[in-house]
Amino acid sequence: MVYADGSTARSPVVWPALTEAQVAEGGTSVRITGIADRAARPVTATVWVWQTDAVEITSVAEGRVTTLAGRAPTVPATVVATFNDGSRDGGTAVPWDPVEPERYAEPGTIEVRGTVAGTTYRANGGGDGDRPALRTLRASSA
């Protein structure tokens, strides 16, 4: 537990039982509230429901890069991926698709897509909000 003054303490927590309906669908999460025994205060936790026993990526965070018009953007070699167990890894490699020079020749915004290394998971844009593209913002040299 973390108190208002920043101090911390450990306390056993009494959690409610999860129902079968709460854990029936993989790739979801359930937020539960328990009671910390020592402080008799509510505490919350997120339970991630796996689709398989394997840990897998559930989303990739959007990245932003700024460059000058006419100068190739330098895209990051890694992105922040969130996994089905709730963990995050900021060192998840993504080889990005090539960016043609005409796409960054003028000021504006472009999307760059890539595939998470070792998977078929695409970091892409469009209507799929949990798998965003790297958005490269460009400014003119004026």
Image: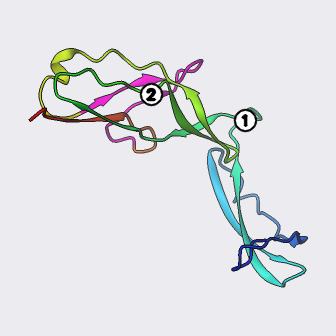
* Alpha carbon separation for disc pair 1 and 2: 30 Å
Closer to us: mark 1 or mark 2?
2
Q: Quadrant of the N terminus?
A: bottom right
> Is 118 included in the stretch rendered in magenta?
yes
Mark linked to residue 76: 2
> Is 120 included in the stretch rendered in magenta?
yes
Residue matched to label 1:
52
**Closest to the observer, 129 or 75:** 75
Judging from the image, what secondary structure is the residue with disc 1 in? Answer: loop
Mark linked to residue 111: none
Which residue extends farthest left?
Answer: 142
Q: Quadrant of the C terminus?
A: top left
Q: Identify the mark nearer the N-term, 1 or 2.
A: 1
- Left or right: 59 as drawn, with respect to 46: left
Type of amino acid under label 2: Pro
Type of amino acid under label 1: Thr
What's drawn in magenta, residue-wise?
Answer: 110-128
Number of residues whose C-alpha sits closer than 10 Å to that of mark 1, classed few (under 14), some (14–19) or many (20 or more):
few
Residue 59 x/y as whole percent: 53, 40
Number of residues whose C-alpha sits closer than 10 Å to that of mark 2, classed few (under 14), some (14–19) or many (20 or more):
some
What is the quadrant of residue 52 in the picture? top right
Judging from the image, what secondary structure is the residue with disc 2 in? Answer: loop
Q: Residue at 90% of width from left, 81% of height from top?
A: 38
Q: Residue at 70% of width from left, 48% of height from top?
A: 49
24, above or below 70, in the image = below
**Closest to the observer, 66 or 44:** 66
What is the quadrant of residue 135 in the picture? top left
Majority SS type along the magenta span:
loop
- Left or right: 8 as drawn, with respect to 58: right
**Closest to the observer, 118 or 24:** 118
Q: Residue at 54% of width from left, 38% of height from top?
A: 80
